[in-house]
Image (cartoon, rainbow, N blue to C red):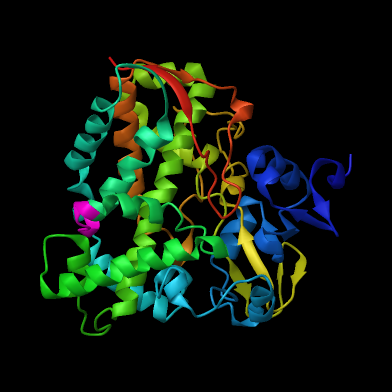
Amino acid sequence: MSAHEHCPYQDGRVVIDHAFKADSPARYARLRRLGPIHPAEFHLGLKGWVIVGHDLAREALTHPALLKDATPAAEALAAAGYVLHQPSVGLGAQMMEADPPEHTRLRRLASAAFTPRRTAELAPRIERIAHDLIDAMPPSGELDLVEAFNAPLPATVIAELLGIPPRYHLDFRRWSGQALQVASPEHRPALAALHGLLAGLVADKRRRPQDDLLSALVAVRDEEDGRLSEEELVGTAMMLVVAGHESTVHLLGNAVLALLRHPGQLRLLRERPELVPGAVEEFLRYDTSVERSTSRYASEDLELGGVPIPRGSMVVVALGSAGHDAPHPDGDDPAVLDVTRSNARHLAFGHGIHHCLGAPLARLETAIALRTLLSRVPELELAVPPDSLDWIGSGIIRGVLSLPVRYRVG
C-alpha cells in the first residue's frame, strides 16, 4: 500500500495532528519503513520536515546549520500566529531557544546552580510526596491517576525546588500545565501569568535569598559569563518548569499505561523493584513523553538523508520514533516493551548541546514514583478501554489527558 493509505497526507505532507498523536507509535513505524525524513505539516499549519530515523536524528540534533534562531522562517511563523522575540508570552530568554555562544553561556550559568548534588538531595522529599499522595487516596475504587498522582508529584517537586511559596502552588500547577503549548494563542494568558509569577519571585529572591534553586540562580556568577539577567532568570525558571513538570507528568503516565497494557511486565517489576532504574530507560525509549524535539531552522541550504532542505525550513526530530529505530546489538525487537532490557538506547532527552538539563531529575522522580506506586498499590488496572483514552492534541508532548484506573491501596 502507498504511504497515503496509511498516513494522513495532505498536499504531499504527513499531517501531525490530534489523530496522528493518538496513534503515533504505529504511524511513525510506517514512516520509518518509507524513509528517515518526511515533509510534514504541524500545529497551526506550519510546514517543515520531520525526522523519524535514529541515525539521521542524531545527525540533525548536532548539525551546525540547524539552529534555534527562527529568523529565516519569520514570515511563515508569523502567518501561523507565532510571535518571535516576545518572551513575555513564551518561555522567556532561555537556553532551549538559544544558539552558541549565548547557549553556552546560559547553560554554564544554569548548570552551576542546578547541580547533580542538588538533584540527588531531593530523593527523600520526592519519596515523601509520593507517599503523601497515595495516603490521600481513598483505600480503593476508581480515580484519575493523572489528577491524583502523576501531575501533583512533579508539580510539587519543581515548585519546592524553585522556592515557590505554597500559596501559589495551585495557580502554578494550572499555569505550568500549559507551558509546552506556547504556540497556541489560547494559552498565552496562562503563560503570561506564569511569567509574571516567576518574575516577581526572582525580584523577591534577590532581596531575600533562601535555600532554593531560584535563589541559587540569582546568585550564580562567573568571571567569564557574568550573571543571568532578569529575563534570563525568568526564562531559565520557565524552562525548568517545562522540564520538571509537564514532561515528567506524562513520562510517568506513559510508563504506568505501558505496564497496565503489559501485565507480565507489571508483575515482573513488582517482583523485582531493583529493575526500576533500568525500566525508566526502557519507558523513555518505548513511549517517551517528549515525542518531538523543539524546532530547528536551516540557516543555509543543506541536505539531510539525501533530501535537499532549503534555507529557512523548519526541521523537527521525532525523538520517540528514534527510540524504536536505534541499533540493538543483541537483536532485541524495539517494538517490544522489556523492563529487563539493558541497552535501551533512546534520544528522549535530546542529543548534543541541547541535551535536557533536567534529565537527572526526571529520571529520579519517575523511578521513585514508580517504586512507591507499585509497592503501595498492589491492585491497579485500567478502568476504561485503552482505545478510549484521550491524548494531548498538540505540542511536542505525548500523553493522556486522564488515566482512569481501578485500584486498591495496600
* Quadrant (top left, top right, bottom left, bottom right) of the N terminus: top right
Q: Nearer the viewer, residue 124 or 111?
A: 124
Compared with 121, 375 (above or below) is above
Q: Position of residue 406 (x, y in %)?
A: 44, 18
**In the rendered image, is residue 107 in sight?**
no
Compared with 107, 281 (above or below) is above
- Left or right of 221: which side holds 85? right
Which quarter of the figure has residue 106?
bottom left
Residue 307 is one of the magenta-drawn residues: no
**In the rendered image, is residue 262 in sight?**
yes
Compared with 342, 247 (above or below) is below
Q: Position of residue 367 (x, y in %)?
A: 33, 36
Which quarter of the figure has residue 384?
top right
- Left or right of 199: which side holds 279? right
Residue plotted at (31% across, 28% down): 371
Q: Position of residue 390 (x, y in %)?
A: 59, 37
Look at the image and give the residue range highlighted in magenta. 161-167
Q: Nearer the viewer, residue 289 or 44?
A: 44
Residue plotted at (27% across, 46% down): 156
Residue 166 is one of the magenta-drawn residues: yes
